[in-house]
Structures are given as structure tokens and as C-alpha cells.
Amino acid sequence: MNTLTYHLRVLALLTLIIIFGACSTSKSLMKDGIEFQASGLDMDAVNAFKSSLNKNMSNTASREGLQLTGQKVLNTYLDDFSRNAMMNRSKESVYAFIKADGFKKEVKKYGADLSVPDHYYMTYASNEESYLNERYEQGITKLEQDDFTGSKVIFDEILQIHPGYRDVESLKGTSVLEPKYRRASEEMSTGAYRKAYYLFDDILRVKNYKDVQSLKKECQVKGAFVMAILPFENHTPSMSAAPKAHAYTLNALVNLENPFLRVVDRQNLQQILAEQNFSLTGIIDEQTAIEAGNLIGAKSLLIGTLIEYREERGQLKRVTMNGYESYSFKERGEDGKEKLGFRYKPVTYNQYTDKNSVYLSFHMKLISLETGEVLLSEVIEKQSVDQVSFASYAGDRKNLFSQLDGRPDVSRAAVDEMQNLLHARSELEPLSTLSNQSLVDLAQSLSTKVELYLNR
């Protein structure tokens, strides 16, 4: 057989396997493996025998073929390992043996137990130790040179080849954690305690590294943001909205569970100010607010004013609509048999709409008691709306249709819309519910803005 004919035959066989592989049986795949084996394509034969066994693990002939051909492939890998070992190429020999050992383990899943003489394992152990020791020293050097990325690459390779090798796991931890430790220390030295805190926290999630535990606590203390919330001023007719907004805001800030935020609650605030003969009701401007804040030992002060608060109760609106109701009747056809027919009669039904809404506008300020600077100042607007749209009909509701161009609209969309209107809710959420929702939303916005400031 000439070379061209040989290659054409192999190509044709591969094409047939690709086309018919999905529907091939274990027996046909076994035959493919035998043909590849006869052609000297040992790796292709191995794959065909594995595919055959995937279809039927009881195919003894495929397992025998895999045992025979797999051993030949393994011997090729072992020969490559021996050549590299004889030439003192430790890296190449290590990876050649890993490839051979991986192949042996893979075919063993199919019941083929390939043979590797003991002297190969002894030679590999010597070469592995030589190579890993060399890489270990290189990793240490890179670590000493502060090349943390390079050292991690080396330590990862060592652990992949030999998990648990010497103290590589610990050294790898240093490669990963030391850069973050240094960045955290730099942030701490510049007074960016909150940024440093979170970097130290990331390190502790991996391991208790160096003095990170104590440094994290130090950052939390030095980065503390003690904030007092004064009762909100009210410039609206509502007597309850501002106190509720204050209570909801305090609750939202506490629920943040921010490690730096310390909130002076209303009870303590009143007690401290009362001892100093300072009236809460007298806090109406920034100067008196700062004075009050200093009395309670806060670093910042949150003050706010409810500028506008509006409840709008809706008015139920009714519109009489023209529609059609379908009804059935019996009639006798041309064949004399009775049959059921449908007709539509004009009717009217009522469609209703209603809406309740609550709107508020709030001006907040976050003031630094150390510098007097206004840290945050913003007007926040919130609106909660509930509206209903429904229909009522005194007749047979399931047979009611809307009107389109003077005819009943029997399209699926129109039928669904009509039934939705007839079964829609008719009761609005009360204004008290909408009011609370608006105030809760306001409190959430205020707490979010404070946290964004803390984490900036």
C-alpha cells in the first residue's frame, strides 16, 4: 500500500467515525479500534476502544484491545521520559512522566491495567526532587525580590506536581497576602483607615497573617465615624411625618451594620443635651447643631428638614362603556338537525379608576464637627402611588366583550383585558400605608448616602 492510499484510507475512516459516531454501537466502535490498531494509529485505536466501552463496559474485546494498544502508547510516553532523564533534563522528564502516569490512570477507568516497571518510579522520584528543589529556590529568590506574582506562579506549579511539598503552601500564602498587607499598611499610614480595614479583613478571611488581627482592630477604632442624628425639622402641616422619618432613618443606619458607624440614638441624645440645658427644639441652624453635636462627642451630625409633605386622596371616577354580551341559541340547520349558535347583544358596563399618592421632599445635611464642613447636602424626593382600574357588569361577566368599531372585539388580547378588568382589585392602599412606604424609602436613601460617604 503506497503512502497516498494509506492516508486516504485513514482519512475516510476518520470521516466515517465523525459522521456516524453518535449512532455507532459498541461493536462498530470496537471494529474501528481494530482497524486503527492494524494501521499503526495506536492513539486513535485507544480512543475508539474507550468510546466502545462507554457504550458497553462489558465489551471484553474492546477492553483487551485497549489493554494491548494502551500499553504501546504508554511505552512511548515512558521512552520519552527515559530519554529526558538520561539527558538530565529534569523538567522535561518530570512532565513526560506525569503525562504517562495520567494516561495510565485514565485507561484504568475502563478496566485496562497497564504496567509501569518500578525503576521508572524510582527514576521519577529522583528527577522530581531535583526539579522541585530547583523551582523552590527560584520561588524563594523571587519572593525575596518582592516579585510576588512570579513567586506565586512557581509555588502553584510545585503544588500541582507535589501537593504538600515542604512549606510551599505557606510561601504561596505569603506571595498572595504580602502585597495586600503592604497596600493595607500604606492606606493605614495615610489615614485611610476604612480602606485599610477592608484589606486586612480580606487577608483574615484566608489566614491569620502577621499582625493583621490587631491592625484591623486599630483601623476600626481610628476610622470610627460617630454620628448623631438630631430631630428633623418640619416645615409641613403634618405633625407625624418628620418624627417617623427620624425613627426610620435611625433604624436604617443601625441595620447597615457598618463596622465604622456609631450612631447616637435619640434617647441618649436627649439625656446628654438635657444635662447641658440644651433644648432639642432649639436646634434650628448649623451653628446650634454643631454645638449640640460637640456636647455629645460626635464627629458628625445628620440634620434634616421635611420641606414638603403632601397626601393626595383620589376620587373614584366612573365611565359608562359600550360593549356586547354573547348568548347562545339553538337553530335547525338545512339538514334538519338542531345546532347551537351564538349572537351578541349591545350592553353597557362601568369602568372605574382611582389613585392615592403621597409625595415628600426632604433636605439632608451631614456636617463634620471637626472642621464644620458640610460633607453631604442633598434634596431627596420620594413618592408612593397606588392606583386601581377595574370594571363592573351586572350581567354575565364571562360573556362580556368590549366594543371596537361598533362590533364586539373577540380578539384574545381584548378578551384577556376585559376579564382582567372585571377581576381586578378595587380597593386602594390607604394613605397611611403609602405614607409609611415613602418615609421608609426616604430613610433607606439617607442611610445609603451615609454608607457611600463612609466607603468612598
Image: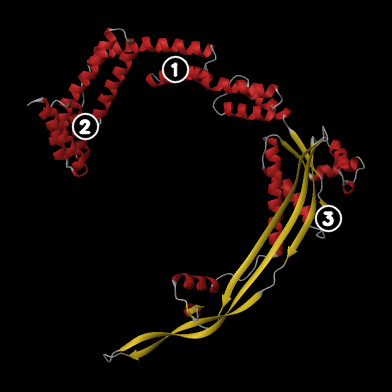
Kind of element beneath mark 2:
helix
Residue 235, numbered label: 3
- Total marks in image: 3
Kind of element beneath mark 1:
helix
Q: Are marks 2 and 3 in contact (CB under 8 Å)?
A: no
Mark 3, other Cα within 10 Å: few <14 / some 14–19 / many ≥20: some
Which residue occupies the foreground of this view, 247 or 45? 45
Give the mark, 3 or 1, whose residue is nearer the N terminus. 1
Residue 47, numbered label: 2
- Residue lying farthest right? 277
Q: Amino acid at mark 3?
A: His
Residue 416, numbered label: none
Question: In the image, 175: left or right of 66?
Answer: right
Which residue occupies the foreground of this view, 429 or 345? 345
- The Cα–Cα distance between marks 1 and 2, rounded to whole angstroms, is 34 Å
- The Cα–Cα distance between marks 2 and 3, rounded to whole angstroms, is 82 Å
- The Cα–Cα distance between marks 3 and 1, rounded to whole angstroms, is 67 Å
Give the mark, 2 or 3, whose residue is nearer the N terminus. 2
Question: In the image, 385: left or right of 30?
Answer: right
Q: Which residue is mark 1?
A: 154
Q: Is residue 31 visible?
A: yes
Mark 2, other Cα within 10 Å: few <14 / some 14–19 / many ≥20: some
